[in-house]
Structures are given as structure tokens and as C-alpha cells.
Amino acid sequence: MSTLTVTVDGGVAELVLSRPKALNAISTQLATDLVDATDQLRADDDVRVVLLAADGDRAFCVGADLKERNGMSDADLLAQRVVFRAAFGGVLGLPQPTVAAVHGFALGGGCELALSCDILVADETATLGLPEVSIGLVPGGGGTQLALRRLGPGRAADVVLTGRRIAAQEATSLGLVDRLVPAGSARAAARQVAEQIAANSPVATRAAKRALRGGWGLDYAAAMDVEDAAWRTAATSADRREGIAAFNEKRRPAWPGR
């Protein structure tokens, strides 16, 4: 793919945005490549965790490619919107646990891509924000809803309606960032998190992710039904039998993954 790379090692797939000269801005081609890449990763049973990172020193991703959008008609923009929604939905909808490694600017769609991951690791150079209202738009890659779920209504409104840029330390305090690490170490730290997840049962981690995501917005009783369904999936799996056997035999499990 011309705008990103995918490598798989040890059950961890690294999905890396690769338009550093454009600060990894999301062009129509990058969005299309994200759709293709996430489709492939979703179907790959050997991939236990997906790590989303970016090339270049200055930015994780600065959002939509506004140079490409300059001069677009409303019809052009609406046509691009279909591809963009599929791209963001592809990341959010991955069944594997996902970890974002954020450095530099993560603005607009870049922030939304990071928030679409289950765990967001950022280094001290990171600056996050959803500035769409400053150019006459609304966050459209899940930003309003993901911010709302992470931050609550008041803080989400502060982030979305002001469009302000948020430095890494404040982003961590707010809850936009889950782990803050020293400058230059986001990708290595995110890789460590991904490898820790990948060492666990793939059946259990996918089921746990479904429980975490599926419980959003539900009342407690309904959410507990979602959790119960996830528990039953894991409890009746070959992974559960192997996990208990390995524990009793004092060895590392060899997960069947089914």
C-alpha cells in the first residue's frame, strides 16, 4: 500500500501511517488503504493485537488532507465521506485489541484514529485536539462520541466546541491518553503493551473487548448480559482448557486460539 505499511511479528500487527512529508494527513488514498488493511487484519487469525503508529518525527496524523480538499465540491466531499467513514469504522471495528502509539500532532482525524483504539499510549511530544469547528466542520470520524465516552459530557464539550490543542500532560489528566511516556518512546512503549496483550488468550482478549465495547450506553443489567455472553465464549473455548492446564502444570500456555 502506498500510504501505510503493515508488518506482523509475534502476533502483533503494526499498522503504520506513512505520509510523513504530509504529516500523515488522511488523503482519500490513505483512507482507502486503511479500509483494505483493516479488512485484511480482521480476517487474520494469527494477528492477536494491532498497533497503530506513524512514520516521521513531527506528527502522528494531522487529520484530513486539507490540500486535497481545497476546491472540492460538496458532491466530492460527500463522496469522500463514504470512504472516510469506512476507514475510521475499520479501525474502531477491529475484533483484536488495538493500541495507538502517538507522538507529535494528533489532530482532527488523527486524534479520532487514536481514540478509535482501545489503549492510547502517547509520549511527551504529543498534542491532541479536535479542531474541526475552527474550519467549519464537525468531528466526523467518531470524535464527538469517542470523546463523550472517554471524558463525559462537560469535558467532551470543552474539547470539541473550543477546538483547542491539548498538550500530552493535560490530555492524560483529562483521560484522552491512557499512558504517558517519555519523548521518543511512544512506539516502543505501545509495542510492550501490545506484546503483553498478545501473550494472553486470543479468544479471551477478543471476548473481553466485545464486552467492553458492547456495554457502552447500556444500563447495568443489559451490560451484564453482554459480559455474560463474552464469559461464556471464553469459558467454553479450548483456550480456557489450555490456560487452566498450563497454570496447574506451571508452564506457559500454548493457546489454540479457538
Image (spheres, rainbow, N blue to C red):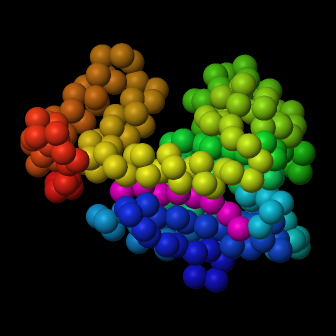
**Could one spot residue 148 in this view of the protein?**
no
Relative image position of residue 45 (x, y in whole percent)? 29, 64
Can you tell which quarter of the image residue 66 is in?
bottom right
Q: Residue at x 38, y 63 (%)?
A: 10
Q: Which residues are magenta?
A: 48-55
Q: In the visual, does 38 lie left or right of 148? A: left
Q: In the visual, does 162 lie left or right of 201? A: right
Question: Measured along the vertical axis of the image, is residue 36 above or below residue 230?
Answer: below
Q: In the visual, does 58 lie left or right of 96? A: right
Task: Assess whether residue 21 is covered by the magenta stretch.
Answer: no
Q: Residue furthest front?
A: 250
Can you tell which quarter of the image residue 243 is in?
top left
Relative image position of residue 81 (x, y in whole percent)? 65, 63
Relative image position of residue 27 (x, y in whole percent)? 72, 71
What main secondary structure does the magenta stretch of the protein show? strand
Question: Measured along the vertical axis of the image, is residue 222 above or below residue 183?
Answer: above
Q: Residue at x 67, y 50 (%)?
A: 186
Q: Residue at x 74, y 59 (%)?
A: 61
Question: Measured along the vertical axis of the image, is residue 44 above or below residue 244?
Answer: below
Relative image position of residue 210 (x, y in whole percent)? 35, 40
Camera-side residue of 139 and 258: 258
Camera-side residue of 85 and 59: 59
Q: Residue at x 86, y 33 (%)?
A: 162
Task: Assess whether residue 50 is covered by the magenta stretch.
Answer: yes
Camera-side residue of 210 and 5: 5
